[in-house]
Amino acid sequence: MSEHIKVLLPEDEIAVRIQELGERISADYAGRQVHLICVLKGGSFFMCELAKRITVPVSLDFMSVSSYGGDTKSCGVVRIVKDLDESLKDKDVIVVEDIVDSGRTLSYLLEVLKGRGPKSLRLCTLLDKPDRRVVNVNVDYTGFQIPDEFVVGYGLDYDQKYRNLPYIGIVEFESDTPQQAERASI
Ligand code: IMP
Ligand code: MG
């Protein structure tokens, strides 16, 4: 199926917001070091930009989790595909995610990470779709709340495509276009 991408959040707007988040995190963690955990692959673009705007000392680690399937909906079964390299013991940890949708991935992940003895554990997400929440997740830092639309870009993919778009866009599938709808109704 072919798809069209409509811009939702342009690059310059995202940059301004990430700068604000970086300043807030720097103030909140003054005098401390933050340990950022990137949830691959979607969180990678956001984490790099965010890390550059944090002025307290930063260390980084990466993990990859997978909810099965390549579709636009997460089915709630989560597994760790790549685990962290370093211990979280006594660290001030911030998990950096691309998007919180149903909340299933993050609620699972935060429980696992909490068990590893961090001094503190917070969550920072670029995007939040609150309308879609199934499992409650406490989000400490949010870039943007967005409507219930499937989005791509800035690390987010549709079937592994579009992660490299420098903006966030809504995926409009061909059958969603007015021309298609008109054709279908004839
Ligand atoms: P969850 O439903 O909160 O568990 O989100 C699971 C994962 O689904 C997210 O980390 C994203 O990788 C992916 N996801 C959710 N919504 C979108 C979207 O709109 N575009 C691309 N990926 C999404
Ligand atoms: Mg993700």
Image: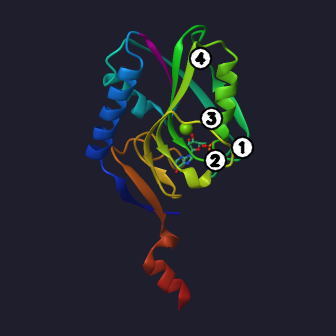
Q: CA distance from mark 2 to mark 4?
A: 24 Å
Q: Give the residue number, with chain letter if any, for mark 1.
A: 76
Magenta span covers which residues? 32-39
Residue 106's label in the rendered image is: 3
Residue 183 appears left or right of 67: left
Between discs 2 and 4, the one toward the N terminus: 4
- Tag shown at residue 84: 4
Residue depicted at x 63% and y 47%: 102
Which amino acid type is marked by label 4? Leu
8 to 165, vertically: above or below = below
Neighbor class of circle 2 (other Cα within 10 Å; few <14, some 14-19, many 20+) is many
Q: Which disc number belongs to residue 102?
A: 2
Quick check: marks 2 and 1 in contact, CB under 8 Å?
A: yes
Give SS at disc 3.
helix
* Circle 3 crowding by C-alpha within 10 Å: few under 14, some 14–19, many from 20: many
Image quadrant where residue 114 sits: top right
Which badge, 1 or 3, comes first in the chain's sequence? 1
Residue lying farthest to the bottom in this orientation: 186
Q: Earlier in the sequence, mark 4 or mark 1?
A: 1
Q: Is mark 2 within 8 Å of ligand 1?
A: yes
Q: Are dots 4 and 3 in contact, CB under 8 Å?
A: no
